[in-house]
Image: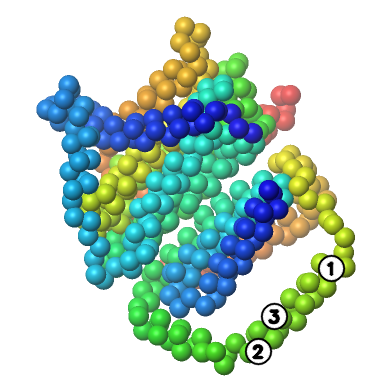
Amino acid sequence: MTVGSPAVVIGILLSTVIVAAWLIWVERRMIGIWQDRLGPNRVGPLGLGQVVADMVKIFFKEDWIPPFADKPVFVIAPAIVMVTMLLGFVVVPFAPGVGVIDFNFGLLYFFALSSLAVYSQVLAGYASNNKYSLLGSLRAAAQSISYEVFMGLAAMGVVMLAGSFNLREIVEAQKDGWYVLPQFAGFLAFLVAAVAECHRAPFDLPEAEQEITGGFHTEYSGMKFGMFFVGEYLGITLNSAILVTLFFGGWLGPAFLPPLAWFILKTLVFILFFILLRAALARPRYDQFMSFGWKVMLPLTLANIVVTGAVGLSVP
Amino acid sequence: MELILFYLSALVAVAATFMVVIQCNTVHALLYLIVSLLASGFIFYLLGAFFAAVLEVIIYAGAIIVLFVFVVMMLNLGSKTIEQERQWLCPGIWHGPAALCAILFAELLFILMRSGAHEAGRIVDSKALGIALFGPYLLAVETASMLLLAGLVGAYHLGRPLKS
């Protein structure tokens, strides 16, 4: 069941956390370029040291717990998103022989952990004992539960084609062609659901700083807020990696680059897509967002499953 | 090794479930319920039912309890309810349920002592599960889906906008 040696496992753990923290700089620079300004470019070459400076600053901030908060839950909440997202990387097939475990139900394991991650937002909002936080966490709960359904249904087409829940077998099954072509509707639905699951703009309604002042993390400061922040970027990285695995052939690619490099390159493309989406689209209203889910995404994903099943049965 | 892991997760499940019952704060009780469900998911995993283990986490811990927490948060129960719960949990109330539970526990022990070892640790893959569900158990699956449909229609009826 194990794939990588302890050194590989530690390498994966460190590189995912470092990449997630470094994405803060990538996001600020990229959105700067998109909006015709420079972004942070003073600390180190190209401003790469900005993340280190931010981390030092955030560690020296006062770690304040509001007196009206539910203390134990308030402290646990930010850790949940970090732990679940890092555990999600356990099943990601980086390359042949590179990964943590080879689990038969890897895809379902990913869904299980992304559904547990919502407790972070829900409990943060509850424990803060604040109107805006509560509104944010109610939105987070409803949004995550709805879009998880579509995410699962969108991935079922791929499972039917590959005949397995094992992410490594799904990648191997794409040797003759990536699933993005036969499963284009599934890919679109999965992409939208992934953005909603990460609470990224344009679907960042649980935070929505203009309406509910930051939502579930309004009362958080210091490194506890930093955990939510890094957890969000871990979520982006994890969802990009799963998108690449399911629809874009994972580590498969022409032989002039090693498999691991292909996987990282493809994942980076999706991470950049997630980031630039924030600068490109405006946030929908909450009711529009939910009715879009149940009236467009659900029929689309169900029709995708029916068509995939029918084609799969008629063309052996 | 597996036996130690099994008893450890079983212990966690029992302790967490006990805490659900005696906890006065509703949200804290729900948190213990999540731990209990995760522990039972782990037991499924140790028995080789990987699919059931993951579904336990996705469906129960990841969706149903989120809805429970959602509703409890909307009710906005304050310190008043905690006080009320504390009064309801007075020791005198425990005698009846404890006696009934003791009878069930004795029955369970009796059955466990009498029957021999059962088959466990066989890995069940998703294909075998699907064949079983849509083969011999098809009628049960269809009945369950009809029950869910009835629930859905009922929920829609209760939630429809009132005619002014």
Q: Which residue is mark 3?
A: B101
| Amino acid carrying mark 2 in the image | Gly
Q: Position of residue B50 (x, y in %)?
A: 67, 46
Residue drawn 37% across and 64% down? A72
Q: Quadrant of the N terminus of chain A?
A: top right
Mark 1 Cα-neighbour bin, 10 Å: few <14, some 14–19, many ≥20: few
User: Disc 1 versus disc 3: distance between alpha carbons?
Assistant: 18 Å
Residue B78, quarter of picture? bottom left
Q: Position of residue A95 (x, y in %)?
A: 52, 22
Let me know if residue A146 appears in the view. Answer: no
| Amino acid carrying mark 1 in the image | Met
Mark 2 Cα-neighbour bin, 10 Å: few <14, some 14–19, many ≥20: few
Residue drawn 58% across and 37% down? A106
**Foreground: B113 or B26?**
B113
Q: Earlier in the sequence, mark 2 or mark 3?
A: 2
| Amino acid carrying mark 3 in the image | Cys
- SS at mark 3? helix
Residue A249 lies left or right of residue B4; in this view the side is left
Q: Which residue is mark 2?
A: B96
Tag 2 subunit: B
What color scheme is it? rainbow
User: Disc 1 versus disc 2: distance between alpha carbons?
Assistant: 26 Å
Label pair 2/3, CB-CB below 8 angstroms: no
Q: Which residue is mark 1?
A: B113
Tag 1 subunit: B
